[in-house]
Image (tube, coloured by chain):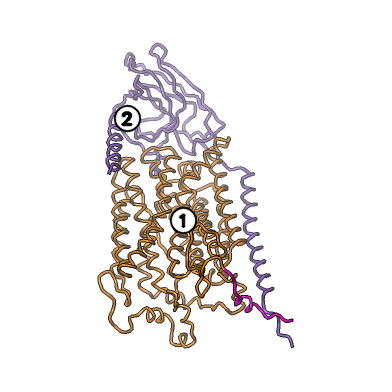
């Protein structure tokens, strides 16, 4: 009977730890950062080859409000078109549940005296085929998001770019597939032929006078 | 000196390693023996069935990678999942015929070797359509279930055939669980060797494909169709009577019990297949786990088959000893309904550990229900036994898991309508009419003419 008790205890702990983590809502963040990136609106980039240069800085109107900011995390985020019918990329207001921005481009410490930063990033080979924008989060000392900035508008409709992903296919793989498939089918035919031959051999011999 | 034909060979006193009945079928089932030809056939058949399950469900645990590579939408994934289990529905009917025509050994090898190319072609898939097509064709391999059951029914006497069938099917179904462990591990290994994510999963598919090919070879090279020899030899000698497909089909299709079991089996085995398809992705997305953690949890669902499906069969036999067929029917109804209840709960719990716990309970009951179904199915018909091995499937998403639980319960209710004149049903006792005997029930499957020729004798078995 100890088993149900243990299970209940772990359930309780799991629930509590969930509650302890700061539940930051995206709608509570102020858009104080200005983020720009090299891809133009509608540009198509190649995964694994092309580069993206991101620049971020503090918006002049929010000068002096950046005392909390300790880190800047720049992320590659899915646009609404690429989120459609794909629940694993869904946007949620609770940031720890949000799946909009799944790839971190760079993470840099932030200092109020030198708020500007930039980074050139080569699009990695495992970035999927989709349409993206770039967002930068400002994090405080507890690693909670406190502000953000992004390359697109609030509706996430402008200034989006597409990444043409690596297919992952190779000529050698294609050839191997064909060879092994042919081998399977041919060996099957071979087995049937052998069975037929065995059956013929064991048929009764024609009656002899 | 002239040696006459094969008739002498089959009548000679062949020594079998296991005790056999008058048809040379084994009367015991020693699980850990490899005695030729009976236990060898058992091990070959469950391993090749296992390989087919591994292949059919090789994609689900890797879906988080594949869906990004092929830009799949949730609809695409859902359709591919349905395709993967629906091909087998028709293939099963064809398999029954194939087994009758050229024996379970060649029929199973034929299916495995013809679906292996589809597995190799996963490496070449580049769109939602090609993904759906390969999953559809690989899914045909699940029809090896028919050849497994057929082979076991040829090798084992009625006393132990339930256990042999149950363990062979259960251990084969294990493949659906094992693959959720194997594929993420193989993928991570290949990726760590240096392949890019989108190439690594393609290479990973060669492993189950090769396993399937090699198991087919083993079946042909080391297996034997019947205790006395292989099909071709026996058929030519006139020892195996042939039956017309149309007659077999007619008797299967006009038996109302077959339809009720098709429905209820759809809601235990079909559910098992659906869960095999969605559970890894479900845990990965809902609880933000790593790929191999989601795979581990998903695997425990399928791996429960190791004991739960055979357990269902054994429980059915136990109930039969105490309460006869009515006991089997009640046990099936209770277990499958409970499976439905746990399915409802699974869709409702929102914490990781509660989900895992409920899922394990759900898996045990659903798989035991499959085992219990096959405690009754062989009794529905003897003539059309091959055809009764039929199944349906249904697909649903996250919250749909709860709805699926409701459907399981609803579709299990028809079991209440099953009635065997000689044994009774859930709510009615056996008929007191003179013609309500086992012999009469099975004899009725054959026409007057056929009975006068003695064809019905193969359904009458002094060993049952």
Q: In the displayed structure, would residue B2 be above or below residue B127?
A: below
Residue found 40% across the figure and 78% down from its top = B442
Q: Chain of mark 1?
A: B
Residue found 47% across the figure and 65% down from its top = B28
Q: Colour of chain A?
A: purple
- Image location of residue B191, percent across then percent down: 54, 37
Mark 2 residue crowding within 10 angstroms, few (<14) / some (14–19) / many (20+): some
Residue found 51% across the figure and 50% down from its top = B131
Q: Are marks 1 and 2 in contact (CB under 8 Å)?
A: no
Residue nearest the viewer, comparing A173 with A41: A173
Q: Which mark is residue B59?
A: none
Q: In the displayed structure, would residue B20 be above or below residue B112?
A: below
Residue that badge 1 annotates: B171
Which quadrant of the figure has residue A133?
A: top left
Residue found 42% across the figure and 76% down from its top = B251
Q: In the displayed structure, would residue A129 be above or below residue B315?
A: above
Q: Are marks 1 and 2 on the same chain?
A: no
Extreme residue in the top direction: A113
Residue that badge 2 annotates: A26
Q: Colour of chain B?
A: orange
On whether residue B11 falls in the magenta region, the answer is yes
Q: Main secondary structure of the magenta part?
A: loop
On whether residue A143 falls in the magenta region, the answer is no
Q: CA distance from mark 1 to mark 2?
A: 49 Å
- Image location of residue A178, percent across then percent down: 63, 52
Boundaries of the magenta span: B1-15
Extreme residue in the left direction: B427
């Amino acid at each position: 009977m100890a088993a149900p008790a243990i299970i209940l205890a772990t359930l309780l702990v799991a629930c509590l730890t969930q509650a302890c983590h700061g539940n930051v809502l995206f709608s509570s963040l102020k858009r104080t950062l200005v983020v720009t990136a090299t891809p133009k609106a509608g540009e198509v980039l190649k995964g694994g080859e092309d580069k993206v240069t991101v620049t971020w800085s503090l918006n002049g109107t929010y000068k002096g409000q950046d005392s909390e900011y300790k880190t800047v995390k720049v992320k590659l985020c899915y646009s609404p078109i690429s989120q459609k019918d794909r629940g694993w990329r869904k946007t949620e207001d609770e940031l720890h549940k949000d799946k909009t921005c799944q790839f971190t481009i760079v993470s840099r410490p932030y200092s109020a005296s030198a708020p500007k930063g930039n980074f050139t990033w080569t699009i990695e080979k495992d970035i999927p085929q989709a349409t993206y924008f770039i967002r930068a989060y400002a994090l405080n000392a507890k690693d909670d998001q406190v502000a953000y900035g992004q390359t697109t508008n609030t509706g996430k409709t402008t200034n989006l770019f597409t990444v043409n992903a690596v297919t992952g296919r190779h000529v050698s793989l294609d050839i191997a597939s064909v060879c092994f498939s042919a081998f399977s089918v041919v060996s099957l035919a071979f087995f049937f032929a052998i069975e037929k031959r065995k059956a013929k051999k064991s048929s009764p011999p024609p009656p002899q006078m | 000196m002239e040696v006459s034909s094969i008739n002498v060979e089959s009548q000679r006193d062949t020594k079998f390693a296991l005790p056999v009945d008058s048809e040379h079928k084994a009367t015991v089932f020693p699980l850990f023996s490899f005695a030729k030809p009976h236990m060898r056939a058992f091990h070959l058949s469950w391993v090749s069935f296992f390989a087919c399950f591994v292949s059919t469900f090789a994609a689900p645990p890797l879906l988080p990678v594949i869906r990004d590579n092929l830009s799949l939408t949730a609809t695409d994934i859902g359709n591919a999942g349905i395709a993967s289990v629906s091909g087998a529905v028709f293939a099963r009917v064809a398999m029954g015929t194939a087994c009758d025509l050229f024996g379970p050994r060649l029929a199973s090898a034929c299916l495995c070797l013809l679906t292996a190319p589809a597995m190799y072609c996963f490496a070449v898939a580049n769109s939602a359509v090609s993904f759906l097509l390969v999953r559809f064709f690989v899914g045909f391999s699940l029809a090896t279930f028919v050849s497994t059951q057929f082979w076991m029914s040829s090798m084992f006497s009625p006393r132990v055939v339930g256990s042999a069938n149950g363990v062979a099917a259960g251990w084969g179904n294990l493949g659906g669980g094992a693959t959720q462990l194997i594929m993420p591990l193989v993928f991570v290994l290949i990726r760590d060797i240096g392949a890019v994510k989108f190439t690594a999963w393609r290479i990973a598919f060669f492993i189950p494909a090769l396993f399937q090919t090699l198991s087919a070879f083993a079946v042909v090279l080391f297996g034997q169709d019947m205790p006395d020899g292989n099909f071709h030899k026996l058929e030519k000698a006139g020892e195996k009577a042939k039956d017309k497909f149309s007659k077999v089909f007619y008797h299967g299709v006009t038996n109302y019990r077959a339809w009720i079991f098709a429905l209820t089996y759809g809601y235990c085995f079909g559910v098992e297949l659906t869960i095999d398809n969605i559970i890894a992705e479900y845990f990965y997305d809902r609880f933000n786990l790593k790929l191999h953690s989601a795979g581990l949890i998903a695997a425990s669902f399928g791996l429960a088959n190791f004991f739960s499906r055979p357990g269902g069969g054994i429980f059915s036999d136990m109930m039969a000893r105490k309460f006869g067929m009515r006991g089997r029917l009640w046990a099936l109804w209770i277990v499958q309904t409970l499976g439905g209840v746990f399915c409802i709960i699974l869709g409702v719990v929102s914490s990781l550990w509660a989900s895992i716990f409920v899922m394990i309970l759900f898996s045990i009951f659903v798989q035991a229900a499959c085992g219990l179904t096959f405690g009754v199915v062989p009794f529905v018909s003897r003539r059309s036994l091959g055809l009764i091995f039929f199944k349906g499937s249904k697909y649903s998403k996250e919250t749909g898991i709860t709805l699926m639980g409701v459907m399981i319960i609803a579709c299990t209710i028809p079991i209440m309508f099953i009635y065997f004149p000689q044994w009774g049903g859930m709510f009615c006792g056996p008929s007191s009419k003179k013609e309500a005997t086992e012999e009469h029930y099975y004899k009725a499957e054959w026409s007057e003419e056929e009975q006068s020729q003695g064809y019905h004798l193969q359904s009458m078995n002094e060993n049952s």
